[in-house]
Image (tube, rainbow, N blue to C red):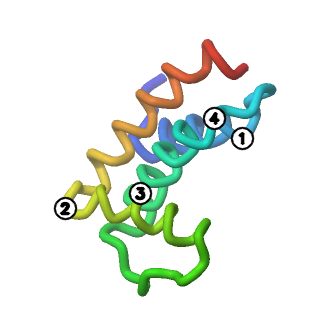
Amino acid sequence: MYLSMDEKFQTACQQVRNFTKRPPDSDMLELYSLFKQATIGNINIAKPTDAKGKVKWDAWNTRTGMSQVEAKKNYIELARNFASKYE
């Protein structure tokens, strides 16, 4: 059975949610930035003033210009790579 890109992306998102070990913040930020780019596109909010919000905003902002399809592909691949470490 052939899965669409969106179906593969949703499967990868579920896989990440089911990790039994918590990835380090750097890995989580990488996943977060790709997820936001894949689901929303280029950053569309003002930079937050809190430290955690700034870090997440900066991570997402690095993806500016990446297509949503490319972000989905990268997220899927990254989730697959992380699965062996965090499942």
Q: Position of residue 22 (x, y in %)?
A: 74, 33
Three-letter amino acid code at the position of disc 1 = Arg
Residue 48's spot in the image, x, y percent? 52, 81
Q: Does label 4 or label 2 sit earlier along the sequence?
A: 4
| Residue that label 3 marks | 59
Local secondary structure at mark 4? loop
Residue carrying label 1: 17
Q: Amino acid at mark 2?
A: Gly
Q: Secondary structure at mark 2?
A: loop
Report the residue that reaches farthest toward the top. 84
The quarter of the image holding the C terminus is top right
Q: Amino acid at mark 3?
A: Ala
Residue 24 is labelled as 4
- Return the residue at label 2: 65
Q: Nearer the viewer, mark 1 or mark 3?
A: 3
Residue 54: x, y in percent? 50, 70
Q: Residue at x 50, y 62 (%)?
A: 55
Q: Which comes sooner in the sequence, label 3 or label 4?
A: 4
